[in-house]
Image: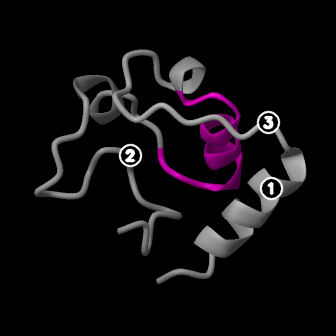
Amino acid sequence: SLAGVVGRKAGSVSGYAYSPALKASGKTWNAATLDMWLTSSTKTVPGTKMPYTQADAGKRKAIIDYLQTVK
């Protein structure tokens, strides 16, 4: 679940098999880090096993705005 992702340390939810790269990234999810991730997850965290790219800035903003409301 992405509920509560904003403000959470990347790779920190127990019970999910995150890539070692994401767990070691040291990132905390906020608007800026989510935008980087959504722009190019593999550049943001090389070695991630969850590749994703959204080139449209408006769509990225909509996703981030939504994630900030999900608790």
Residue underneath mark 1: 59
Alpha carbons under labels 3 and 2: distance apart: 22 Å
Task: Give the amino acid type for the residue marked by disc 3 in the picture.
Answer: Ala
Considering the whole magenta stretch, tell me its main secondary structure. helix
Give above or below for 30 relative to 47.
below
* Dot 1: element: helix
Name which residue lies at 64% across and 28% down. 40
Which mark lies nearer to you, 3 or 2?
A: 3
> Residue 13 vs residue 67: left or right?
left
As drawn, 70 above or below 18: below
Q: CA distance from mark 2 to mark 1?
A: 22 Å
- What residue lies at 53% left-to-right and 80% top-to-bottom? 70
> Which mark is drawn over residue 15?
none
The residue indicated by pointer 3 is: 55
At mark 3, the secondary structure is loop
Position in image of residue 49 (x %, y %): 34, 29
Q: Is residue 50 left or right of residue 61?
A: left
User: Farthest left residue?
Assistant: 15
Label 2 belongs to which residue? 10
Q: The residue under label 2 is which amino acid type?
A: Ala
65 is within the stretch colored magenta: no
The magenta-colored residue range is 28-41
